[in-house]
Amino acid sequence: MTMTQERCHFHCTDGLDVVFDLRGRTVAEHDLRPVCASVAVELIQGCAAPVDWSAWIVDVHDAYGQHVMTFGFDEIVNEVGIRPALAA
């Protein structure tokens, strides 16, 4: 990204299921990683069913649909220190 702030979409997927971010968020480039973490934590904590989050990623795209970055939920869980419920 070349601009100071840009609208990005933070889609989450495990390759089979997907949660699309249709609204997007205006975010500065240096805030991408913290926003990815926030998106992942919100999804993990908002899910009532036990899910194995180990294969999930946040896939960030800019307003033009160009890939910006990918951030794994496993990294987020380790950084933030949350313990998501895992499927048996």
Image (cartoon, grey):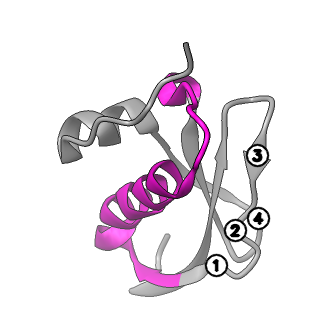
- The residue tagged 2 is 21
Q: Do the residues labelled 1 and 2 touch (CB within 8 Å)?
A: yes
Residue drawn at point x = 75 percent, y = 29 percent: 15
* Tag nearer the camera, 1 or 3: 3
The segment highlighted magenta reads: 26-55
Name the residue nearer the viewer: 3 or 25.
25
> For numbered disc 3, what is the local secondary structure?
strand
56 magenta-colored: no
* Tag nearer the camera, 4 or 3: 3
Q: Do the residues labelled 2 and 3 touch (CB within 8 Å)?
A: no
Mark 3 is on which residue type? Val
Mark 1 is on which residue type? Gly
Q: Position of residue 31 (x, y in %)?
A: 32, 71
Mark 2 is on which residue type? Asp
- The residue tagged 3 is 18
Q: Position of residue 9 (x, y in %)?
A: 64, 69
Mark 4 is on which residue type? Gly
Q: Quadrant of residue 37?
A: bottom left
Query: How far, Cα to Cα, is label 1 from label 3?
Result: 15 Å
* Tag nearer the camera, 2 or 4: 2
Badge 3, how many Cα within 10 Å: few under 14, some, many 20+?
Answer: few
Q: In which quarter of the image is the C terminus?
A: top right
Query: How far, Cα to Cα, is label 2 from label 3?
Result: 10 Å
Q: With respect to residue 12, does 30 lie above or below?
A: below
> For numbered disc 4, what is the local secondary structure?
loop
Residue drawn at point x = 39 percent, y = 36 percent: 84
* Residue 24 numbered mark, or none: 1
